[in-house]
Amino acid sequence: MAKLVLDNCYVLMGATNPPVYNLSDHIASITLSTVHDIIETTEFGQIAKTRIAGLADNSVTFEFHQDFSTGSVEDVIYPALGTALISEWTPLNGSAGDLATASVTWPISGEITKTTTP
């Protein structure tokens, strides 16, 4: 079985106007998550509940290495807050002596598109 090492990942944010920003060199981790609603289908006469999977609810979580220079994570994310699905932003996290980070989870509208082509 093949193993996958995340060593050449990249994350692009933005649209064609404003420009697309490559924040790959500021990202420590990424998590894609899918959770399905559970729809109960129990009918009269059954002695145990039955269920089916409903709609998927997808999200993405990033842990950014934060900085506040021009073209930084803060410079790209903060102006986009409240647009599209950039619904939350905690611009700074850390303790004394820690690397400044910013962690965020945003919902995804629609399906997650997968590709194995670089």
Image (cartoon, rainbow, N blue to C red):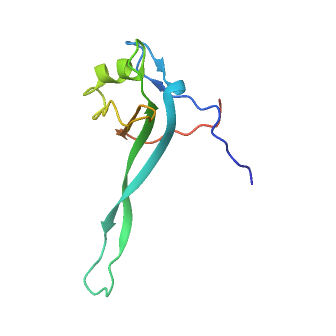
Tell me where residue 71 sits by quadrant: top left
Q: How many marks?
A: 0
8 or 25: nearer the eye? Answer: 25
Task: In the displayed orientation, state which residue is furthest to the front.
Answer: 96
Tell me where residue 107 sits by quadrant: top left
Residue 62: x and y, percent? 44, 37
Left or right placement of residue 69 versus residue 8 in this view: left
Tell me where residue 85 sits by quadrant: top left
Q: Quadrant of the image for the N terminus?
A: bottom right
Left or right placement of residue 53 versus residue 115 in this view: left
Residue 91: x and y, percent? 32, 30
Which residue occupies 65% across, 35% down? 7
93 or 85: nearer the eye? Answer: 93
Residue 46: x and y, percent? 31, 85
Q: Is residue 38 above or below residue 33?
A: below
Q: Is residue 28 above or below residue 32?
A: above
Q: Is residue 107 above or below residue 55?
A: above
72 or 109: nearer the eye? Answer: 72
Q: Quadrant of the image for the C terminus?
A: top right
Residue 36: x and y, percent? 38, 57
Task: In the displayed orientation, state which residue is furthest to the right.
Answer: 1
